[in-house]
Image: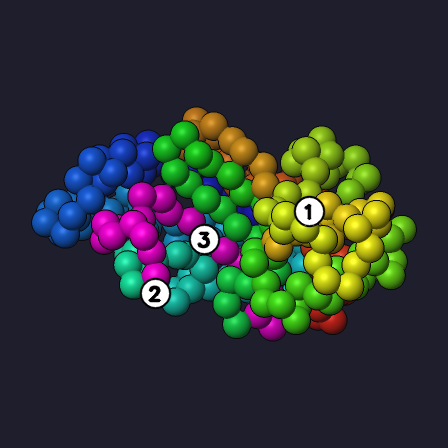
Amino acid sequence: MAGFPGFPKDLFKFLRELKKNNNKTWFNDNKPRYLQSVVEPMIEFISVMEEPLRKISPHFRVDTRRNGGSMFRIYRDTRFSKVKTPYKENVGCQFRHEQGKDAHAPGFYVHLEPKNVFFGGGLWMPPNPELHKIRQMIDVFPKSWETVINDRKIKQRFGGVQGDGLSRPPQGFAKDHPYIEDLKRKSFYLMQEADESLVTSPKFIKEVEKSFQATAPMMKFLCRCLEVPY
């Protein structure tokens, strides 16, 4: 695997300053800096991740395009957000399943934000038909799900499966089901937190690779539920 030196320290400095100056004038004045400290290293990181990700699974896509690729846009869609500032105050990328059309497909994710760095894999807020398939699989094959949640690496690295849930059991599932809290989930993901110092270190990319590898039991389960290859 080719080396990645880590993200420049100015990435977090830029994001901190953006939070204090979240307006078009400041951003346009700092556009060259954004390209140099954020976009270019993120594209390099995405590119270098292609080889380790292919070893984990050949069915997740690495896309180095600056627009519409693995890197998320920094421009906020204010039409559907309560926050009306024009720019997101974090940067991130995703490696989506080849059969996924949007972020609601199984995938791997990296999130970089001052004092809030995390990475891992899973499925975020899938549509109801896909969510129902996952719940059915947990219900019908509880032993398979038990293998996922009891996996040693998952417990050690992530602390367990995460994801917001319903306040009540979903319709059609017994309220006394042994995995009712998992059946109530609306998302299923595993995320590892990290310090900013790791992100600016050459060790960062290897830690992300290890994290992605550790998600395998759950990612395989989710892909099986949705009838897509892992």
Q: Amino acid at mark 3?
A: Cys
At x 63%, y 51%, the residue is 166
First in sequence: mark 3 or mark 2? 2
- Can see residue 111? yes
CB within 8 Å, label 3 to label 2: no
First in sequence: mark 2 or mark 1? 2
In the picture, measured across the screen, residue 166 lies left or right of residue 10, that is right
Measured in 3D between alpha carbons, the distance from the residue under mark 3 to the one under mark 2, in whole angstroms, is 12 Å
| Residue carrying label 1 | 215
**Dominant secondary structure, magenta:** loop
Q: Nearer the viewer, residue 32 or 90?
A: 90
Q: In the rendered structure, which segment of residues is drawn in magenta?
A: 80-100
At x 37%, y 47%, the residue is 91
| Residue carrying label 2 | 67
Q: Nearer the viewer, residue 95 or 104?
A: 104
CB within 8 Å, label 2 to label 1: no
Mark 1: secondary structure: loop
Q: Nearer the viewer, residue 53 or 169?
A: 169
